[in-house]
Image (cartoon, grey):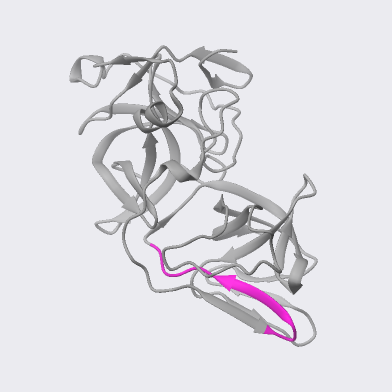
Amino acid sequence: MGNQFYYDRGVRRDAQYVGHPTLGLSVCKFGKTTGATCDEVYKLNQCRGIYCGLAMTHRRNADGGDSGGPWYWGTTGYGVHSGYKTYNLLNRDMFTPLQQVHTTLGLLLKRTDQGTPAHRHQEAGTVPSHLRSRVLTSALVGLTLPVAFLSGCGEDAPGRTMEADGVITFVAPEADGGQDAEIIGELVVGKGQCLAVRTAENQTLVVVWPAGSELKTGGSTRVGVPGAGTVQVGSTFTASGGYATPPLGNGMPTIPEACTSGTEEVAVIDSVRRQ
């Protein structure tokens, strides 16, 4: 299939170049949830939690399910959608520059200097895409990007491990942003009595809840999530977040081997959207 990305449902476009994001650069993204939006690069080399080297736009146009969508202009790829961050009191989209992917994975894409004002009025994308929603899934067809190529930065207050009536769950530290993978599944008690989400693909992934969540028992096991009420064991829910492989590091809670082998992904939830 070569170096291509979806710019419409079922329709691909050749990615001929890897561009370097610059301040003020106009870029567009396609996402499964929010479709097509365009913006300008606002900040470079930004950190969000353990992820650094990200580009930030002026506004927050994306939503859960958009993770992995392409940021591009014409046939030049600039990045892969990677969530958002609160900066100067506003939520703003962020993407991982493809230059990092190119260097790490050795992609055979041509470089370009199209990050200039001359290219800014050439693109008018308005059609939604059909993209995978796993976090850091590449806009290039068939390529999955490892979390490891993003360098860590910053320190957060540590996350928490909570236990009640023999059930264990984990809560992330306070964060200034989040990721946009769509997480859908049933809340279950998994290995080691740890709360997990069972997905439609029959994967059972340990859950790390957003800061402020509380484990509740008595009658039923459930988790109170700030701004979303409670999620009860046995119920199906939809959330925004991301996937990572332990050890999570940087203040995140330690996931014991009794819950996961250490090679399995865990679902890190930033917000619960629907139950």
Question: What segment carries the magenta color?
Answer: 164-175
Is residue 95 shown left or right of residue 64?
Answer: left
Is residue 158 shown left or right of residue 261?
Answer: left
The quarter holding residue 187 reads: bottom right
Magenta region includes residue 197: no
Q: Is residue 212 visible?
A: yes
Is residue 40 shown left or right of residue 223?
Answer: left
Q: Residue 224 location in percent, x, y?
A: 61, 75
Residue under the point 80% across and 66% down: 234
Q: Quadrant of the C terminus?
A: bottom right
Magenta region includes residue 166: yes
Q: Is residue 40 above or below residue 140?
A: below
Residue under the point 60% across and 13% down: 1
Q: Is residue 99 above or below residue 245?
A: above
Of residues 101 and 106, the one nearer the viewer is: 106
Number of numbered tags placed on the structure image: 0
Residue under the point 53% across and 71% down: 226
Q: Is residue 113 above or below residue 173?
A: above
The quarter holding residue 106 reads: top left
Q: Residue 208 location in percent, x, y?
A: 58, 65
Q: Is residue 190 visible?
A: no
The quarter holding residue 274 reads: bottom right
Q: Residue 13 location in percent, x, y?
A: 51, 13
